[in-house]
Amino acid sequence: MKRQFIKLFMITMQFAFYFMINKYFKVHDRIMYNTFFIYLILNLIKNMYSFRTILIWEELKKQLQVHMEYLSIMLVNDIAFWGQRYIIVHLIVGITFTFFNLFILGITRKIFKNELKKNLIIIGIGNTAKELTDIIRKNLFPMYNLLGYVSVNDICGIEQISHINKTMILGTYSDLDRIIDENNIKEIIIAVPLADNQQMNNIINKVDGKVNRIKFIPEFNGMFTFNSQVENYDGLMLISAKINFIKGIGLVIKRLFDLFISITAIFLIIPIMLFVWAKTDKEERKYGLFFFQERIGKNGEKIVIYKFRSMVSNADEILEEMIRTNKNIKEEYEKNKKIKNDPRVTKIGKFLRRTSLDEFPQFINVFKGEMSFIGPRPYLPKEKSDMREYYEKIIKSKPGITGMWQTHGRSEIGFEERLVLDEYYYRNWSLWLDMIIFVKTIENVISRKGAY
């Protein structure tokens, strides 16, 4: 009953805003009520008034879909029945309501958070459980009240190393009945991706009928997510997925975006270059402000990328000496292909790296078509052997200035993890994924998260 009241509250807020816009433009009452009814039906069909936990990206995607459908229907009706003067009204409504609804959702979930949040426990204490927790905590629309975790290491064959706060472990598999009853658990997520069928059956049978919803993370969760669907194939669970190669209209749109952003950025290179020149040590200026390096481009072709020089002129020789004389640095570089607190970085270089301004000249590569703004990391030719089986997949896309690894930890993640994330981009590419990476890139640059 409470949830129905909250849904009514959201619809009332929508109607009040809709009413104000239509009155401002002097829209006839009959047209206003008819169009709002159509808008309401679209929202109900798309289940826009649900209170499931959903990521901001998925919420925004749903909002855009509803309002694109609304605009299409309104355009046809305005031309055929109501008059073309209403096109601008419905265009304003369609655009503003996309973000107004996100505002309504945020406000509603804050006001009624105690009534809406579901008590949740995560079954599992490993790295997957930790990653899931980080996502839940960062989510702008959290509808979970995460109470803690349950270890299932007492099930034969399961041995997870704990990656979560031990004070949050509520008990073990044998305690599940008690934990669910005492805490009024509504939903569980099983974060034990390496569990076999028998082990999963043990867990599911233990909670079946005691909670409203059971979710689980499969072992291959890092491969396909954006283009996967669960299908019931006559009693068998099939997960269908396709690899979205960058082609067709998507390729055209991506290239147009690259041209727009690269041309805009190139105009900014000159003032940035003057600033870098003024802050660069006089001795280092004679070696030039730019750094040129050969990298692996699309289909394995060699390209030369441009960056503002952030290291001393003899950086390669110093690196060889450091690797030869310091075992810890050698291990760090072999693992990450980077060194934290690198002594080769100049004073202005530290600033350029923290702000990501050292990457700016790569927009020239983007303009030339050698790179894309968003794509896999441009790898060094000497790293080809280290890329192993990932190489053939990663090189099918143009390398990017930013991409999956830059928005999921940047310099804080190791070389192996970068390969996995870049392969993920190859498998799951879409214009929507590019939009998410674009927004996250802006967020990371502002917060300087993971940069060194």
Image: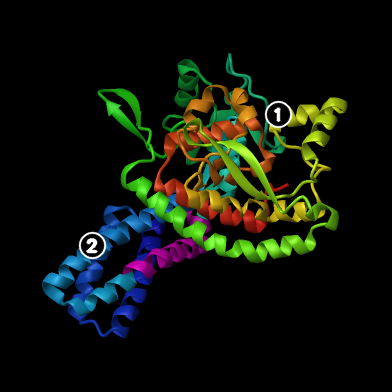
Relative placement, left or right, of 161 versus 400 is right
Which of the two residues, 70 or 8, is positioned nearer the viewer here? Answer: 70
Q: Magenta segment, principal secondary structure?
A: helix
Disc 2: which residue: 72
Relative placement, left or right, of 342 versus 362 is right
Residue at 43 percent across and 29 percent down: it is 208
Density class for disc 1 (Cα within 10 Å; few <14, some 14-19, many ≥20) is some
SS for callout 2: helix
Relative placement, left or right, of 282 versus 158 is right
Which of the two residues, 225 or 269, is positioned nearer the viewer here? Answer: 269
Looking at the picture, does residue 61 appear above or below residue 123?
Answer: below
Q: x, y percentage for residue 237? A: 34, 25
Residue at 76 percent across and 31 percent down: it is 332
Q: x, y percentage for residue 161? A: 67, 25
Please report contact status of discs 2 and 1: CB closer than 8 Å, yes or no: no
Magenta residues (range)? 94-116
Which of the two residues, 52 or 443, is positioned nearer the viewer here? Answer: 443
Q: Earlier in the sequence, mark 2 or mark 1?
A: 2
Residue 49 seen in this snapshot: no
Disc 1: which residue: 335
- Give the residue type at disc 1: Lys
